Image (cartoon, rainbow, N blue to C red):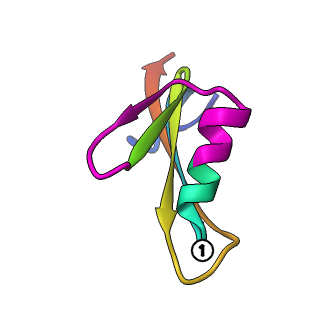
């Protein structure tokens, strides 16, 4: 039992996530996810690929530096 959004004792279950990887070479990293790892993907325009990681996904964003990441959770809460 954890403390969910209400602040009361609730069970929390993570049911999905969205990860973002920032990269100086996003095209090369996207090619790695697509060609080497073989992850399913959707081109959302201009070669911007979103990769499936059921039940989650990951995207590579261009950036002036490496080693910057974001991770978002989708969760549900149930009361006891």
Residue at x 67%, y 74% (from the top left corner): 66
Indicate the position of residue 56 as horizontal and vertical percent values. 52, 30
Q: Name the residue nearer the viewer: 17 or 50.
A: 50
Residue at x 60%, y 45% (from the top left corner): 31
* Residue where numbered disc 1 is placed: 24
Asked if residue 8 lies left or right of residue 30, the reply is: left
Q: Is residue 42 magenta?
A: yes
Indicate the position of residue 71 as horizontal and vertical percent values. 56, 51
Residue at x 55%, y 61% (from the top left corner): 26
Tell me, yes or no, if residue 77 can be seen here: yes
Q: Is residue 77 shown above or below 46?
A: above
Asked if residue 28 lies left or right of residue 78, the reply is: right
Q: Quadrant of residue 32?
A: top right
In the rendered image, which quarter contains the N terminus? top right
Q: Name the residue nearer the viewer: 75 or 45.
A: 45
Residue at x 52%, y 24% (from the top left corner): 40
Q: Considering the numbered disc 1 on the image, is that residue within a helix, a strand or a loop?
A: loop
Boundaries of the magenta span: 31-47
Q: Name the residue nearer the viewer: 20 or 49.
A: 49
Residue farthest to the bottom? 64
Asked if residue 76 lies left or right of residue 38, the reply is: left
Q: Is residue 27 magenta?
A: no
Mark 1 is surrounded, within 10 Å at the Cα level, by few (under 14), some (14 to 19) or many (20 or more) other residues, namely some
Q: Quadrant of residue 25?
A: bottom right
Marks counted in the figure total: 1
Tell me, yes or no, if residue 4 can be seen here: no
Q: Name the residue nearer the viewer: 80 or 41.
A: 41
Q: Is residue 61 shown above or below 44?
A: below
Indicate the position of residue 74 as horizontal and vertical percent values. 45, 34
Indicate the position of residue 24 as horizontal and vertical percent values. 60, 74
Asked if residue 1 lies left or right of residue 43, the reply is: right
């Amino acid at each position: 039992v954890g403390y969910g959004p209400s602040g009361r004792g609730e069970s929390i279950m993570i049911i999905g996530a969205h990860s973002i990887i920032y990269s100086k070479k996003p095209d090369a990293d996207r090619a790695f996810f697509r060609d080497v790892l073989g992850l399913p993907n959707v081109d959302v325009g201009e070669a911007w690929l979103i990769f499936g990681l059921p039940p989650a996904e990951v995207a590579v964003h261009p950036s002036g530096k490496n080693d910057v990441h974001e991770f978002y959770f989708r969760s549900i809460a149930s009361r006891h």
